[in-house]
Image (spheres, rainbow, N blue to C red):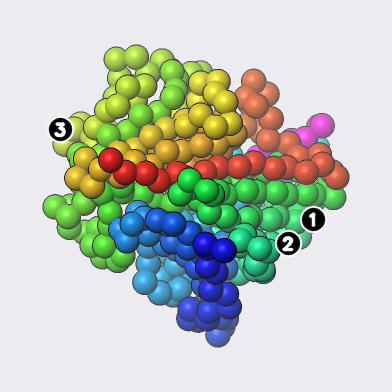
Amino acid sequence: MDYKITTEEIWGRISRGRKVKRLTVSKDDLSVSVINLGATVQQILYRGKDMILSFPTPELYEKFSIGCIGATVGRYAGRIAAGQFSIDGVDYQLTKNQNGNHLHGGQSGFQTKLWESCVIDDRIQFTLFSPDGEEGYPGNLNVRVTYRITEDNGLEIAFQAESDRDTVINLTNHCYFNPNGLDASFNKLTNPMNHDNRDVMLTVNADHVMELDGEIPTGQLLAVEGTRFDFRTPRILACDTDDLHGNYDHTFVLNPHGPEQPVAIAKGLKSGVRIEFLTDQPGVQLFTMGNPGTVFALEAQHFPDSPNHPEFPSTILRAGDVFSSRTVYRFSHE
Ligand code: GLA
């Protein structure tokens, strides 16, 4: 077999002496490490280059869980206005953990949890049980995230969830990329000369972004034509430094596409590395971080605040049904 998995490596400890495991799977040009804290992708090495932002210790992942660095985010990735929604006339109130809204599953979202892990052939699987009422969500929920390296240097991420009551769900992976390669240390972020998204070309197959009222979608879609959101043809990712809007934190509404058709492509002009993003989800959240946008997350997911927008694709998970979604980050080079 041409892949290799290292299992049960204890990477370090977090609060209350809890042990964090790190598992690595390697195949061809790709080596991926994941940790059970937040079912997080901790490192992606492509031809020896670090493709994602990472922390060197588990303590830092625990301390800065708000950034969701590489993590699995849930139960609901993104915002729910005032933390309120209803299903079939029954009202629910979630934790309000950011500016009066609910963000990324609340105070103790999935990114903060220690997941169970197991290895099945060439797959690493994490499972988590989230009890009925956690952060205000209805339903005992069982979640599964499976990582696998594909035949063509892709990291495939498969999500599954099941609940015993009707609930809402929106799961995503929150890796921050730079295809030019990053030093595997968060501190390097403070040096914008090292990593600059001016050297990243991004393409996103989206004619529209979501209009926002503050941080919450109004329900209206804005055409990207003629705006800084027009990535339909390759465009330098970095914001113009004169642009007061600064970084991106916006939802792109993906155009209809097939499951094997990339919805986005990021190319490192310095490295010649291409990252293709494939997903079956209706949107991607582009979030840039650093100065001026050193790394970017492209979170494949449903739209923010969908439970309050019947016109958006539904995020309701009915009791006994299985939610499943799939996202792939595929790496290649010139
Ligand atoms: C998403 C959100 C951002 C921010 C980041 C990480 O991208 O839209 O506002 O919360 O996650 O925390």
Instruction: Please tell me which residue is depicted at 48% across the width and 35% down the height of the picture.
Output: 284
Query: Label 3's element?
Result: loop
Q: Is residue 86 magenta?
A: yes
Mark 2 residue's CB less than 8 Å from ligand 1? no
Q: Position of residue 217 (x, y in %)?
A: 51, 28
Say the numbered circle drawn on residue 242.
Answer: 3
**SS class of the residue under badge 2?**
strand
In magenta, the rendered stretch is: 83-89
Q: Earlier in the sequence, mark 1 or mark 2?
A: 2
Disc 1 target residue: 140
Q: Earlier in the sequence, mark 2 or mark 3?
A: 2
Check disc 1: other Cα within 10 Å, few if <14, some if 14-19, many if 20+: some
> Could you tell me how far apart the alpha carbons at marks 3 and 1 are, in whole angstroms?
48 Å
**Residue 281: image location, x then y, percent:** 58, 34
Q: Is residue 80 above or below residue 154?
A: above
Which of 126/122 is in front? 122
Q: Disc 2 or disc 3, which is closer to the eye?
A: 2
Of residues 235 and 75, the one nearer the viewer is 235
Where residue 98 appears, as percent x and y from the top left, is 49, 49
Horizontally, is 90 left or right of 297 in the view? right
Amino acid carrying label 1: it is Asn
| Residue 129 disc label | 2
Q: Residue at x 50, y 25 (%)?
A: 254
**Which residue is drawn at the image coordinates 45% and 44% (left, top)?**
330
| 84, above or below 60, in the image | above
